[in-house]
Image: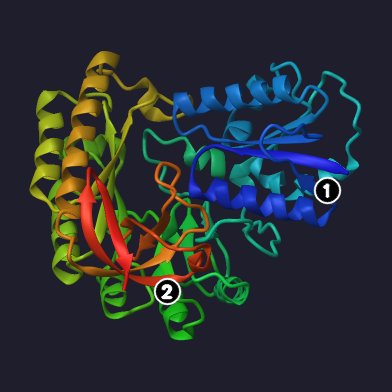
Amino acid sequence: MKTFKITTLGCKVNQYESESLGQCLKSAGWTPVHKEEKADLCIINTCTVTHKASMQSRQAARQAIRCHPEARVLVTGCYAQTEPEVIAEIDGVDAIVGHREKHRIPELVALSSNEKTGNPEIYCSNIGHERIFRRIPMEEIGERTRPFLKIQDGCDAFCTYCIVPHARGRSRSLPPKAVLDSIRALAGSGYHEVVLSGVHLGCYGNDLTPKTDLFSVLKAIDRERVIDRVRISSIEPHELTGDIIDLVADSTRFCRHFHIPLQSGDDGILKRMGRPYTRAGFGSLVHRLRTRIPDAAIGADVLVGFPGEDEAAFRNTCNLIQEIPITYLHVFPFSPRKGTPAAGFPNQVPVNTVKQRCKWLRKLGIAKKTAFLKSFPGKAVTVLVETRRDRKTGMLKGIASNYLTVLLDGGDELHNRLVEVKIESMKGNVLFGAER
């Protein structure tokens, strides 16, 4: 019996690709290992969006080599694409596979020798030349209750701080028919929610012939009515159009949840970042969302410590977040990435200053989330019950349309079911409810 283990770092797209690779390997006769069992093949699906992510990717590779000394170790993902020569220096890595070749991993594994030579095989071609949406065939999605579906890959924006276009290549889209077929297949397998994901989701369809867009495919999904819930992952503020907002507001199909990258609330910093919107425009968008969909969860990414971010610029970001009805924040420190313009920008912000600003913003994010949650006790929401219980309490964990996590008592028969729940109490930042 051939066994494998996949370690995934980074975004929803990486998670989707790891799940897809796992299913392909299982179809080819491989068996996933559980917990501390030894594996014959270890795949590390890496991230490089920050310096820390690259470091964690190297650590994951070394840990696999230590824990599975007889295994073949294959490193793939964004870090493998951008810095294969660095990974090749890790003693014990057997293969490095870039994004253009990622879909071939099951084939490459089958063709490779089990002998460890000390010289890794490298399959990394220029991702900038890729124009095809490479789809990894998939029959099912493991144990995840709310599967990801990648419908777009790559990015054409080239923000001055971002390594992603260099790691993922240009924007490429899954054709609308394939999107609908995939959702039908997931619904037919018993799933109730799908999370549409992409590297730059708002660019969906620009590369297709005939050209289409995200609103058109969302409208087609709504018209098909083949799955109970559809969640839209991160989308750029200037690409969250009025048509999309109205579609979500008027439909029972789409989750009341938006994640919108802000990055900075200072117009000067936004311009240096290459972000095509203003603080006023972002604020207007969030107010429009709250007015049109009052119970929506609205999350935002914030990038702290971009070169030239002085105290006034940071205050502009803080003030904007305080003024608008944001639900939660994802806060990241600026990390210079080799090959991006911002890595060489002057006026780099001291590390300790960045840490302090991140800490302050994270506290603000918690306060925002608490304020949002306080409005829900006494209300009824429909949650999708996860197949895994909450680790601390052992209670069932349900996810509402607006991304609220609700804990409730109940038997395993409620797993993967949509259940109407009345929110009874709130402890800390956790909501507790009971089935109605």
Instruction: In this rendered view, identify the residue nearer to me: 382 or 212.
Output: 382
Task: Describe the colour scheme in one phrase.
Answer: rainbow
Q: Quadrant of residue 268?
A: top left
Residue 285: image quadrant is bottom left
Q: Position of residue 189 (x, y in %)?
A: 63, 72
Please, is residue 78 above or below residue 409 in the view?
above
Check disc 1 and report its element: helix, strand or loop. helix
Query: Compared with residue 144, is residue 381 higher up or lower down, i.e. above or below?
Result: below
Is disc 1 surrounded by few (<14), some (14 to 19) or many (20+) residues within 10 Å? few
- In terms of sequence position, does the residue under pointer 1 or pointer 2 come before the other? 1
Task: Give the residue at x 12% y 51%.
Answer: 324
* Residue at 56%, 72% in the rendered image: 183
The N terminus appears in which quarter of the rendering?
top right
Is residue 205 visible in the rendered structure shown here? no
Q: Position of residue 125 (x, y in %)?
A: 70, 39
Amino acid at dot 2: Leu
Query: Which residue does the numbered mark 1 point to in the structure image?
Result: 107
Residue 435: image location, x then y, percent: 34, 69
> Cβ–Cβ below 8 Å for labels 1 and 2?
no
Dot 2: few (<14), some (14–19), or many (≥20) neighbours within 10 Å? many
Q: Can you tell which mark lies on residue 218? A: 2
Q: Tell me the kind of residue under disc 1.
A: Glu
Mark 2: secondary structure: helix
Spatial separation of the CA atoms under disc 1 and disc 2: 34 Å
Question: Could you say which disc has been placed on residue 237 in the image?
Answer: none
Q: Is residue 374 left or right of residue 80?
A: left
Say whether residue 2 is left or right of residue 181: right
Vertical comparison of 363 with 206: above or below: above
